[in-house]
Image (cartoon, rainbow, N blue to C red):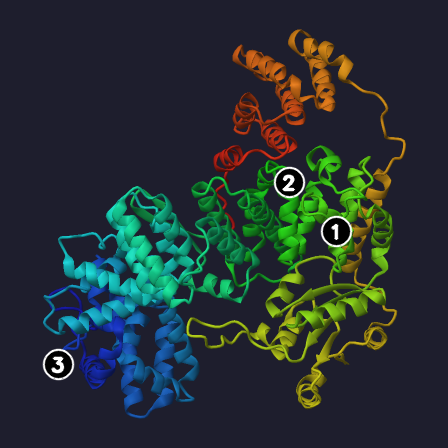
Amino acid sequence: MLCPPKGDGGERCSPIARRSIRGWTRSVQAEEVSMRNSLTALILGLSLGGAGAAMAPLSYAAELDNNPGVTAEEQIREILSEAVNEYRTGRFNQAAARLADALALNPENRLIYEFYLAIGHAKFIRMSERAELTEVMKEVLRRHNVYQRELRQSEDYIRLLISKLDERQDTRFTDERQRFVATRELVAIGPIAIPHLIKHLVDNREDRLRVYCRVVITQMGYRAVVPLMEALKAEDSRLVAAIAVSLADIQDPRALPPLQNLVDHHEDETVRRVAANAIQQIAQVNGLAGRLDSGATLYFKEALRYFRDGDQVRDETVANEALMWRMDGNDLTYERVPAYAWNELIAEQLLFDGASAYTDTQAFYPLLATVLAAQMTEVEERLNIARERITEPNRSYLTTAALEERQQAVELLEDRIIAFGATHLYRGIQQAIVSERYDVAARMMALLRDPRLAHAERLLPSKGEGLMAGKAGTVLVAALDHPDKRVAYHAAITLAHLDPKLEFFNAEKVVPNLAQAVGEWAMKVVLVVDPDYRSRNAARNALQSQGFFVITAADGFEARARLAETPVKDAIVIAGDLIPTLRDEWGRTIEVPEQTAAGLIAALKADRRTANTPIFLSLPENPELAVAVENELGDQVSGVVRRPYDAVELEGTINLVLGDAELPETNRRAREQVALEAATALASVDPQNKSQFALEPALDALIATISHRADALRIQALRAIAHTAAPSRINQITDVYQELDSAGQLDGKDDVRIAFLYAIGNVDATTEAAVEIIAAAMQHASREVQRAAHTAAGHGGTPSSAVLLRYQQQQRLDVRSPGAGN
């Protein structure tokens, strides 16, 4: 309250204070219509008392705050009242001064929030339009928004709103008006209200409330889909059916994979029928009737969409507030994750769900390996940028500390990726290249530099076979011809490290690629941003023919991502007709600077990494449009180039600006890393390293050694056995291991255990005993043993779907919240 109540031991209000209070009250009365349009004010029961009555604090604050107002609060309220009176009498400078006085007392944001609701949105706008009040009202709005965000995160507030959906005791409002208010506020709160709302979907004691909660979920629309998809895993069949009905109401096709899973696998006939009806309704609305894919294909395509991270996915990240969901029994909970990792974590969840439901589908595993590699690559690239940053970012998950936390959490993902085996890794590289995630492809190629993991002799195509889909390693030799030099270089580096006896297809291109990569330190790197893939390819070919290293991007968002990768760019070419592609749920363009050429140019100039990088404008082929673009943006760039691209003209324009200037140190370090890796690969090629000796005749002696000899001999014998790769001896190896392990003779002997795992992985890791040994070792206390177990699984070739799913589910890392900056 604005004045202390009588009898509390404090002084009674002065006449001036009483007039101020009455003035604020009359102001509130005058704005009653506006107040009733203020949904939050209405639902929280803000007092609209008659003349002379003090305005009570929000009923919500009274319900939840056991220590209402103190003297400081009363003083702040009185000053705010005076500011309103000054405004009403036309003394705008004095009103601004009183508001500034109130803010100088550092009030709780709650008080400013209540003040905003008390004057109403309409009056707030009118006050803000006065030049004298503009700046101070901005601060009022900022504090209001801060508290509103905090309020909407409160579980008590959400429960209060839900109770108002069927509240019949408040005589001030009709039932329909109150429900409307509560519904709108719950919709504004968004996904975090879903766990509370779905609890009422199966409450037979409150039929009206159940219906109203369903209405709220439906109106929340596409923002509710992701949590509802996870909620379909509930144990209560009635709840599952109710959620399926809500998804049918929303009609979003993203829900099709888990709904189809219910149809295919749920034990309850009612649930299956409801899910089938939901699928039919969603398919009909989205034009998919009669041509729906299988459940496995639906999961795969949806995961691939999230991995590729287009405009729609970026919009979903914002709408879903970067939240990941988990259903435990009938309780739905969420965790906030780093926004940049949300799409990959969603893809991971979809792939695990799909692989668990459709166990015979091998296609999930290459993409899952790629998604895990992407999680590692993403945080590493962002951490490299953060360590060079001189100012703190405006997002907590982008701080160096948060990124280091996440890097530490995801580093174990490398073990899980290796455990997929060579075939899935090769096919994962193919997925990464097709998706234009070249950084991920390069990371996965680096893992395949282990000859015993790559199985080059078996999986690479020979010269006679050529490029053939039947050989998983075809993607690696085909990558030698890829137009993106980063892909070609890393393919050559990997093949040089493998150096198989097999004369594989395209082998003659390895050394020339490496030779070019070794000289990479002298090459200049150009980033080309163009929405037309034909223009991107033309620019790449033109520039590469003149000796440039070229990186391409389809839009401004991808361009910013490419800036996170190495090598660092010396010049940037931006299409002048770059157009917005990111849209909201109604199809309207969302204003983001990176979506237009002008906005992207401004963003790049504001970025410390590219502030001094020459930017060139690529003009459209249409002459009139080209003139308009050049007139608008020509003075903001270092030069212009015309389409269709001419290689000589393009080179001349860029080199005219770049000249012979010495390259930045960061550029040089990045390129020297590429050159170093290429030189190391060349050094690894040893024509003399081709053995003519067969170890098979010594197998019996070696097997006997691992049973009865000292540890040093046992380790060397196991390594020799591994190099024979004789599957017929695997049972003897696993029998000895199990005998020694059960007798405790391997306790504290991690080096011996690791040698056994090395032998098992190279001889045959697919037998029942081998799988049990590897699975147990994956959970060993020693980090080195864990790594050896994952490597053994990968060396063993391609495990069956059941075995691979067992490994991945058992070893799945919960890397959702690390690095979120919560």
Crowd rating for badge 2 (residues with CA inside 10 Å; few <14, some 14–19, many 20+): many
Amino acid, disc 1: Ala
Query: Which tag, 3 or 2, sits closer to the chain's start?
Result: 3
Tag 2's secondary structure? helix
Query: Which tag, 1 or 2, sits closer to the chain's start?
Result: 2
Snapshot quadrant of residue 638: bottom right
Tag 1's secondary structure? helix
Left or right side of 332 for 68: left
How far is mark 1 from mark 2, CA to CA? 16 Å
Q: In the rendered structure, find residue 423 and report the number of the disc placed on it.
A: 2
Nearest to viewer (mark 3 / mark 1):
1
Query: In the image, what residue occupies the spot 70% across and 71% down?
Result: 534
Is 472 placed above or below 639 here?
A: above
Crowd rating for badge 3 (residues with CA inside 10 Å; few <14, some 14–19, many 20+): few
Q: Nearer the viewer, residue 319 or 431?
A: 431
Crowd rating for badge 1 (residues with CA inside 10 Å; few <14, some 14–19, many 20+): some
Amino acid, disc 3: Gly
The percent coordinates of residue 819 (x first, y second) are 52, 50
Res. 20 in view = no
Query: Which tag, 3 or 1, sits closer to the chain's start?
Result: 3
Tag 3's secondary structure? loop
Query: In the image, what residue occupies the spot 64% across and 72% down?
Result: 531
Q: Which residue matches tag 3?
A: 50
The percent coordinates of residue 785 (x first, y second) are 60, 27
Query: In the image, what residue occupies the spot 39% across and 72% down?
Result: 104
| Tag 1 near tag 2, CB within 8 Å | no
Q: Which residue matches tag 1?
A: 478
How far is mark 3 from mark 1, CA to CA? 81 Å
How far is mark 3 from mark 2, CA to CA? 77 Å
